[in-house]
Image (cartoon, rainbow, N blue to C red):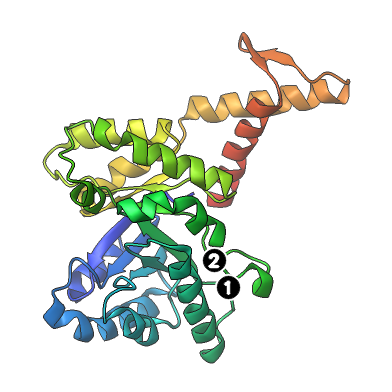
Amino acid sequence: MIRSLLFAPGNQPRRMEKAFTLEADAVILDLEDSVAPAEKETARRPVAEALAKSAAVRRCRGYVRVNAMGTPYCFRDLAEVMGPGVDGVVLPKVESAADLHAIDWLIANLERERCLAVGAIDLIPIIESAAGLTRVERILQARGLKPYSGTWRVRRVAFGAADYGHDLGLSPSRDEPELAHARERLVLASRAADIEAPLDSPWFDLKDAEGLARAVERSRRAGFQGRLCIHPDQVAQVNAGYAPTADEIARAERIVAAFRAAEAKGVAAIQVDGQMIDYPIVRQAERLLAALKGAG
């Protein structure tokens, strides 16, 4: 389970160092939006050093967000940052399966060249435009790498609501019903591609903790597993909001135990807590418990 992914600007060493000491499930050192064009080239080395230095002691995953494929920075971002301590790459503004194929090929060759395990580096595409959302099913079916390593490069996708809204000329209200269609499609496309549940967009109003809480609850109920964070103060709230409650865990355990006992007797439909339980509900409970086991 990845509940929280905290961005830290790649040109600010102290903020990068601090980010790894917090409780985020993953830290994303950013070379894109938070770094001005004049500093993009010089930020690469500090990012690579921060990821390598923290690898042995950090408790979270370490990612780098490179610049988009259509920029003059993307290739050198990968070439100069890829190395020890990099758990994954976040790729913004993905708009086609060709983008993923190209990045997958580059990462695979850098892994081989630098004696890294081929396929170990995760790739998270961000969908943040009309073109990207329109093609999201084909994008996620690309996934990358399986024939070479036995694993998929793309295990989850993220939503970039701000850029998506700008692209469509939307003015989302506080509860963001204007973006519901995009979120629904990302959840559906992720399930159809048999990858993990998607990651939701950052919450940008840093003074509106109540709004963030409502957004997290909506997001989790809608099928997202976690959220991108742009401030350390958001991490604890996001972690708590996307984690299953004690009651949900206990209920999942009751469902699985009761159904296995019934199945051994040839019964495939039972009641638990007054609700009819069959295979789809059991599989959902099993996925929750499996995610918890993996997180532990």
Q: Residue at x 56, y 56 (%)?
A: 141
Residue 88 coordinates in the image, percent (x, y): 44, 69
Residue 136, percent across and down? 45, 52
Query: Could one spot residue 116 in this view of the protein?
Result: yes
Residue 208 as seen in the image, left or right of residue 292: left
Distance from Cα at disc 1 to Cα at disc 2: 6 Å
**Residue in the image at 88% along x and 20% along y:** 265
Where residue 30 appears, as percent x and y from the top left, is 26, 69
Q: Which mark is residue 119?
A: 1
Residue type of the residue flagged with mark 2: Arg
Q: Give the camera-side residue of 153 and 7.
A: 153
Please name whichever residue, 180 or 53, is drawn nearer the observer in this view of the structure: 180
Instruction: Work out whether 226 lies above or below 281.
Output: below
Disc 1, disc 2: CB below 8 Å? yes
Circle 2 residue: 153
Q: Quadrant of residue 66?
A: bottom left
Q: Which secondary structure lies at badge 2?
A: loop
Disc 1 on helix, strand or loop? loop
Few, some or many residues within 10 Å of mark 2 (<14, 14–19, 20+):
many
Decide if residue 71 is on the left or right side of residue 256. left
